Structure formats: C-alpha cells, structure tokens
Image: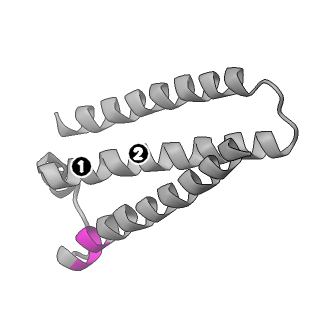
C-alpha cells in the first residue's frame, strides 16, 4: 500500500513540476521574445543558451517520468503481478528515451 501512495505522490509532484517548467518554456518563447514567425536560425541560437537547454532537458525528464509512472500505475490498477520486472523494463525504456532525447537536443545545438 505504501508503494501505491508513493507512486501517487510522485505522479502529482511530476505533474506540478511539468506545469512549472512548461509554463516557463511558454513564457520564454511567447512573452519574453514575441515574434510573428520564428526562423530556424533563431530557434537554434536560443537553444545554445544554457537556460533553454536546461528547460528542454527538464521537460524531457519530467515528461518521461510522468508518462512512465502513469503507465505503471495503470498497469498496477489493472492487476499487474510482475511489478519488479515491469519497473525494470520501464526504467530501461525511460533511460533509453531520455538518452535519445538528450542526443537530439545536443545534435540540434551542433
């Protein structure tokens, strides 16, 4: 029962963090730097700064955690028995997807 309470709490925390970082991302893109049309060169120049890279990495991290934790919770609620195996698979999937996302951000910068 404690595990269910922890996953429930972590789901709410990750949702709150996602809202904060997504709000910051939207504010930086549309309020702090208003432009009618954003050119590719402008987007690339923004992403070179540390603040944008940090925001994208945090969005990736919190989004993946929120999605995979939610998937795990749904699976447990439907009667999943092999919890340790499922957690291991979801951790491997999360680390892999985070690596792919991080690689994409780095390639976009270069």
Q: Along the line of sight, which residue is nearer the eye, 62 or 44?
A: 62
Which SS class for mark 2?
helix
Q: Is residue 53 above or below residue 26?
A: above
Taking the image as shown, residue 110 lies to the left or right of residue 14, namely left
Picture coordinates of residue 62, whole percent (x, y): 44, 49
Q: Is residue 74 above or below residue 102?
A: below
| Residue 89, quarter of the rendered image | top right
- Magenta: main secondary structure equals helix
Which SS class for mark 1?
helix
Taking the image as shown, residue 63 lies to the left or right of residue 109, namely right
The residue indicated by pointer 1 is: 54
For disc 2, the neighbor class at 10 Å (few under 14, some 14 to 19, many from 20) is some
Which residue lies at the image location 31% right of the left edge and 64% below the top edge? 25
Picture coordinates of residue 28, whole percent (x, y): 24, 69
Q: Along the line of sight, which residue is nearer the eye, 39 or 49?
A: 49
Which residue lies at the image location 25% right of the left edge and 38% below the top edge? 108
Which residue lies at the image location 67% right of the left edge and 45% below the top edge? 2
The magenta region covers 27-31
Q: Quadrant of the C terminus?
A: top left
Residue 28 belongs to the span the image colors magenta: yes
The residue indicated by pointer 2 is: 60
Q: Is residue 34 visible?
A: no
């Amino acid at each position: 029962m404690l595990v269910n309470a922890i996953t429930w709490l972590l789901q709410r925390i990750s949702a709150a963090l996602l809202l904060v970082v997504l709000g910051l991302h939207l504010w930086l893109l549309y309020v702090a730097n208003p432009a009618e049309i954003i050119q590719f060169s402008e987007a690339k120049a923004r992403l070179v700064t540390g603040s944008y890279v940090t925001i994208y990495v945090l969005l990736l991290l919190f989004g993946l955690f929120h999605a995979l934790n939610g998937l795990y919770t749904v699976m447990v609620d439907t009667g999943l028995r092999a919890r340790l195996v499922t957690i291991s698979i979801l951790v491997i999937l999360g680390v892999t997807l985070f690596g792919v996302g991080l690689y994409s951000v780095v390639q976009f910068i270069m």
